[in-house]
Amino acid sequence: MVQYKMMQRYTGVDFRYVSLWWCIALLLTSCQQTTQHNHKEGSAYVAEDSRGLKIALTQPAKRVVVLFEPMVDELYMLQAGASIVGIPEQVYQNESSYQFLSKLDKRIARKEIATPTYGGRANNVESIVGLRPDLAIVYEQDKETIVQLEELNIPVYAVSSKNKQRIYKELRGVATLVGKEERAEELISYVEEELIKMERPVDSVRKKVYYAWSKGRILSTSGRGSLMDLSIEAAGATNACTLEMEAPNIGAESLYSWNPDIIVLWNSKLADVYTLKELTALPAVKNKEVYVLTPTFNFDPHTLKFMLFAKQLRHWCYPEESAELLKTQIQEAMDKLYHSAKEGG
């Protein structure tokens, strides 16, 4: 305090206030750097992620770690699978995903692509750094991983896949960062054309569809505004669940009150429904209107394949063509989405 007063006496400046303003200036600079640290000057490849942050690269990413399984799928759609150097362990554990992707990439078939995770769930940041990525694609809820990677100056593109608009925007964003913008537009245009073909007259009667979660969780469903709701609406049907919730758990009485025309299962068995005593009197169960989406890889609603989910569902709701013709159409769609391209050595 004595030193401050002596300095003020000779200079006319109160250095306590100088110090205060210096701290404020440092704080503002720090905040600005935090906001802009991903946006490099002169970058030619810039994309906004689900957080609203702009991720910028000076050249297309060549070594990409993907920690959100649906984005592994979409990188292969973009014909950028060769750039992947790390994936979630679930890609190998999910038989449906593994069987398909192993045909596109021999590294998948041989399980050579690294899985920088702990037990398939938590991410191992040290392993990720060891892969020397120039881009990491991370689910937006994995906040700890995002912070750790960004502190290590690894560009992170966060994704959510929460609705159709996000799926399109994030596909375009990733495509920009890996130099595949034209392919992204080609894919989105194709999906939009297919969705238009599935539109039903506004005044048509719409079937009510109940979606049940995986692994036999029949009384867990997806409400209005969810990805399942997106696929149901695209099929020209209505979500039987009236709740504005992402993943509600319900009682059998709710299912009876909604009285769905059909029940759709994901990674569950028909027996999971037909053996539930509390549902034996439900009309959809009595009429055997319970269906299983299989293989699940073909119908992942977190990706552009929400369109295929809708196509299959539309057939169950409004069977205007044969099952064999539908099977052919789905195979043709898969060929379009993946362009029958093989990647990897």
Image (cartoon, rainbow, N blue to C red):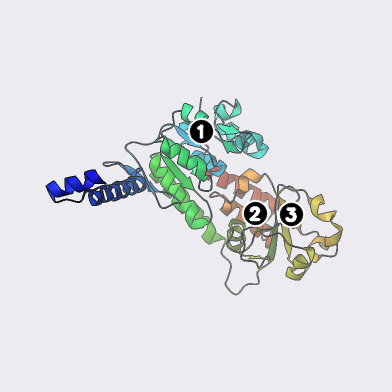
Disc 1 or disc 2, which is closer to the eye? 1
Residue 337 spot, x, y in % from top left: 52, 45
Which sits earlier in the primary sequence, circle 3 or circle 1? 1
Which residue sits at x=42%, y=39%?
Answer: 150
The numbered disc on residue 312 is: 2
Cα–Cα span, label 1 and label 2: 39 Å
Amino acid at dot 3: Tyr
Q: Is residue 77 visible?
A: no
Instruction: Look at label 2 and name its amino acid.
Output: Gln
Q: How many numbered marks appear?
A: 3
Compute the Cα span from label 3 to label 1. Answer: 40 Å
Residue picked out by circle 3: 291
Kindly check if marks 1 and 2 are in contact, taking CB atoms under 8 A apart as contact. Answer: no
The spot of residue 291 in percent (x, y) is 74, 54
In front here: 118 or 162? 118
Q: Which residue is mark 1?
A: 125
On screen, 56 above or below 232?
above
